[in-house]
Every structure is written in structure tokens, then in C-alpha cells.
Amino acid sequence: MASLQPKIKSKVRCVDGEIGEIVHVIADPISLEVSHIVVCANGTQRQVPVSAIGAVRDDAVELTGKSAQVAAFPEFQREDFLTSKEVEIPHLENKVHVEPGDLLVPFPPLEKSCARRNFFAGFIHVIGALIALPFVWPVLRFIMKPMYVPYDNRWIPIGNIGKIKTDDVGVQFIFTKSFKDMVIERREDKNHWVIKASPDMLKKIYPHGDLAFTDAKGDVVWVNKQTVPYVAFAGKCPHLGCGFKWRSHKTLGPVFLCPCHLSIYDASGQVLDGPAPRPLDVLPIKVAPDGEIQVIDVEYKAGKKDQVRIA
Amino acid sequence: MNPLLQQVYDFVDERIDLKTLEAKMMKEPIKGGSRWAYVFGSVLLFIFIMQAVTGVLLMFYYIPSADHAYDSTQFIIHEVDYGWFILSYHFWGSSAMVVMVFAHMSQVFLWGAYKSPREIIWLVGLALFGIVMAFGFTGYLLPWDQRAYWATVVGVEIMDKTPLVGDFMARFLKGGPTPGQMTLSRFFVIHVMVLPGALMGLAGLHLFLFRSAGPAGPFRGSPEELKAKTDFFFPRQVWKDIVAMAAVFLTISALAIFEPVVLLEQAKPDPGDYAPEPEWYFLFLFQLLRWKLFAGEFGQFLGATAIPAAFMLLLAALPFFDRSPERNIFKRPIALLSWTAVMTAILVLTVSAIINRDFLH
């Protein structure tokens, strides 16, 4: 049998006459059938089980008993029920239609008087935090492992000064650097620029005399003597880290020019034009008697007014 | 329906309530009726699905190692059957995604659809915009050719200039002080795991919120007119959506066929004759950083961080200060002017970056 579909406001009749009208319909959340109707008789709302219904007609619902028996049914307590919209009961609304108004379902007693609701809510968060918090530090350390490695102060051969023919002209030295990249042994082509500076240029490059390079602790690892004419510039543009070139500029003459954001430097590395915040970076340089050049592959952060060493 | 099919349908419906699902997915009334202007969201979903499919396929051959990324990408292009097409589709698909995001945002902006009660949808949409740009940025490195390498070097340096967190962010992304294997590994994981997860979650939320708030509808017309023209999402809007998807599919395929991806030399820290530049949709920002105004430490912060961040914040705050219920774009002169100004600025900057490119070679 299809489930009963009593209508709200329809009249309710007992065998001995009309007693009132339906004000609510209650469904059973397990069987998804109508379980009770609530009848308002003489100002009192009573919960009548469907077993007491004889027939549902278009104009009225007929009960099997007498009007006196209706008074025996329990009084309806609204706070014991929820509307079907306040809870999630799959399929219920497809099976039982109540109009006009809400379909009621029982408010589970355990939920209605959940004395420790705040306790549960609080401890759900506490336990969640207990699971998550111990992970924060290990995860952070895990991710940060390669981020702050010590500086590499090795001397790397990059070529011979025999390649430089003219003073104050940028010469590119492309060299291969071998290194361990986490677990991989890698070789990578890098490039730096070396100039043989005239005395005037040297003064511009070393305005404060000899140039000292320090390691992470601040200990001096090398000093570039201001009298050595060979100067190596790191191949990384101090603006945003592109690779610059030695080019002839139509008004400025021969210059270092970075194609990315058009920063222009003279042979001493001073900024002539463009967005660069500081001159080209001078590297620690060692020239052997046979002319072999070695540098420490120091790397500074791009985009800063001051040199901030990162590698 | 075919009786057997009907039986299957009834079987499933009885268990998971297909009818409700159908009603929620397909029978959403669209105020004022379906329109071509509403296709952008669906098209974006379609492009994303295609990016996911082609992306998964590429991972069958791609090796995310500094020593193999370039060779494995070349292998996909030159050796794997239709590898060139799958890769080029994925490449052009990313451009299509950015174009569609701009179209979608413009439509929502011009239609005033970000206004109450759809503020949260707009905010989630902005987060999705960020994710799409991050997809483009991280994916660009993976072929590990000169173009990829240098766009990333510069991009990460720009991020490095963010006050307080910049240094950490740059080291986090590079996986060290300088770019290398860890950079590739991190970009790979972010591109194939983190961003897809974030996008699926947020796009789901975006759609859910959209369905909860309902579509905004046209900005003109009386309630009676709108009611008279109302139809369901299915079939007329779905039809328009699928036609747009087909057009996008054909466009991306044509670009992939006629302009397939060609790699430059393998990445190395010496750019050689290559003048580094980012993907075209970042060119405007790239060009901005060439200006004198944005030179020096502070200027760079202004150009690379402050202005883009302020612009995004402005967009996020938009539905909260623009509280007038007026949605007709022709009655919102400031909105129309701002949109035109921003679009013109992006266009002019992009074009000047392209002109500068010729000047360099």
C-alpha cells in the first residue's frame, strides 16, 4: 500500500462526528511512512497514530474510534519534533508529501538533550589540533631542507686571460661547473665576464680600495687587490637575474646590456641606464702565473641596492 | 526511454535519487533565458578537463629531472606518436585558459554579477584566477629549455622582492638559494598535484555557491519579461555551452597543429643569444618592470608586488564598496571606464613588450 498522504487542515471525523482538523503530519524516519497525524480538537493538539485512521478521503480523515477515545491520545509536544528540512533523511520527501506546511520527524532524544554538546565540540577541535600540530614542524623542516645550504667557496677555473685582447672590454667566460644537486651529480654551463681594467676603471671598480669577501660567519675568505687589473663580474644581472651581454649602444658606446629589462652598465659595472639597483657584482678572482683565471662562484640576491650573498 | 534503459534508470534512481540530482544539475531556471554571454564558465571547465587529460598523458613520458626533463620533452615532441599534438594542445590550452579567465571575469564585471548576494562567488573566482596564473607560471618551467629556465629565474626573483616573506618564498620555490633540480621538482609537484587539487576544490565550491545564489540574469528587463524568457539550463544553455566548447576545441587544435611547440636549447645559466621573456600573458608585467619608475629596490617593490597586490585587493573589495544595486553597465560609468582603462593598459604594455623584443634582436 502506498503510504498515507493526509493533508494539513483537512477535517477529522470520528464515528460519532467531526472533532477538529489536522495541524501537523509526522513521519517515521526509518520506514519513511506517515506515523501520526496531529489533530487539533477543542483547542488541544493530540498525536494520533495512523493505526487509528480508518480512511483518508478527499474531504476528511476518518478515525475508527469515538471522539471520547481521541482524548486518550498523548498531547502533541512541538519541541519533540523537527521539520524534515532541518534534518537530512534521504528519500523521505520523495515518499511523503505534506501540504500546505512542513512534515515533522521526531527529534532524537539523545540529540535533544545532548548535555555535553560543548564538550564534544571543544574536544573535536582539540583532538584535531593534536593530530595536526605535531606535523607542522616536521613538514616545515622537510620542505626547508635544501633552502638554506652553506655557501660554496670553492675556486673554479673559468679560462685564461689570453682570451682578453683589449683593456676595458667585457669578455665572456663560459665554463662548466660540476656540483652535487641533492642526489644528482650535475654539470652545468655558467658564464661570468672578465675585463682587464685600465687604472681609471680600476678606481671606479674599487672605490674603497681592496675588496674583501666573507663567508657566512663573517670570516674573510679572499681579498681582491685593487692593483690587480683583471676583474670578474658575475654573469647574473643585479636587476632580476637575467644574463647580460657586451653590446655596442648607439649613444653610450660599448656597454654591458641586459636584454630582459634593459639595464645598461659601463665596463666598470656602474649603472648607466635602466632599472638596475646596483653595479655589477665583482667576484673573488685569482690569476695564476700561467694566466689561468679562477673565481669563487659567489652569488648575490638580485634586485637589492646592497649585495646580499645567497650562494 | 528504451524499457531496459528505463529499468536501469529506475534501479539507480531508487537508490540514489537520480531525479533530485537531475533537477539540481539540469533543471535550473535561467532568468531571462540562456545566452551566449554565459558560456565562459562552462568553457573554462572544459578547458581544465582537457588540460588534465593532456597533462596526465604527458606524464606518461615526462621525467622531472634537470638532466632528463629537456630530453624527455623532446622525446614526446619528436618520437612519441602524436606527442607533438598532445604537448602543443596542452601548451595552447593554457593560453586559452588565461584568455577565457579574462573573458569570464570581464563578463561578470560588466554584467555587475559580482554584486550582492554573489560576493563570495566573486572572491572564490579571484582565487581561481590566481591558481590559473600559477598553473601557467609553474608549467612553463617543465620543458627545461632556455625560455622556460629564464622566465622562471626572473619570475622567482620578482617574488623575492615581496617584503618580509619574499626571501622565504623564493627559496621555497627554488628549493635552495639558486635554481636547479629542486626548483624543477617543486614546480613539477605544484603543477601536477597541488594546483589541480586546489583548482578542483575551489571550482567545485565556485559552482556550488553559484547554484546556491542562483544566476544573476540580464541587467535589463522587468521581472515579467525575465519570467517570460526563462528557460532551464538544459537544453538551450547546455547547447550554447557545447557549441562554444567545440569552437574552443577547434581553435586550440588548430593552433597546436599549425603552431606546434618548438623547444629552444636546453636550459643553462648562460642565456647565450636568447633574450629571456615570460609567457605572453605575463608580458605586461614584464614590460612594466622596464620603466624607470619601477627601477631600484623600492620601484621594483612598487611594480612587482605593490601594484599587482593592490589591484587584486581592489578587485576583492569591489563587491563590498560598490554596493549600488545598479547592474546595467551603461549606467555605471566608473566601472566601464576602469575596465576599459585596465584592458587598454594591459594591451599597450603587452604590445610594447613585443615591439621591444624586435628592437633587441
Image (tube, rainbow, N blue to C red):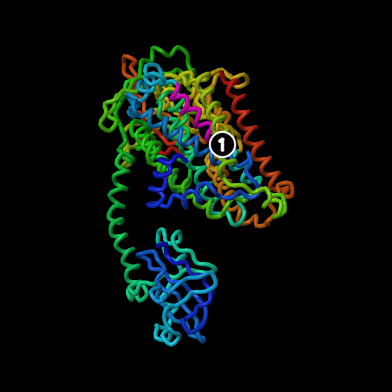
For label 1, count other residues whose C-alpha is less than 10 Å away and answer few (under 14), some (14-19) or many (20+).
some
Residue B324 relative to residue A7: left or right? right
User: Given the image, what chain letter belongs to the residue carrying mark 1?
Assistant: B
Residue B131 located within the stretch drawn in magenta: no
Of residue A271 and residue B249, the one placed in the foreground of this image is B249
Q: Which residue is mark 1?
A: B100
Image coordinates of residue A135 in percent, x first then y, are 29, 52
Of residue A93 and residue B326, the one placed in the foreground of this image is A93
Question: Residue at the spot x=43%, y=87% of the render?
Answer: A68
Can residue A228 be seen here?
no
Question: Residue at the spot x=50%, y=22% of the render?
Answer: B256
The image quadrant where one finds the N terminus of chain A is: bottom left
Where residue B342 sits, quadrant-wise, is top right
Question: Residue at the spot x=42%, y=41% of the render?
Answer: B5
Which residues make up the magenta segment?
Answer: B85-98
Residue B94 located within the stretch drawn in magenta: yes
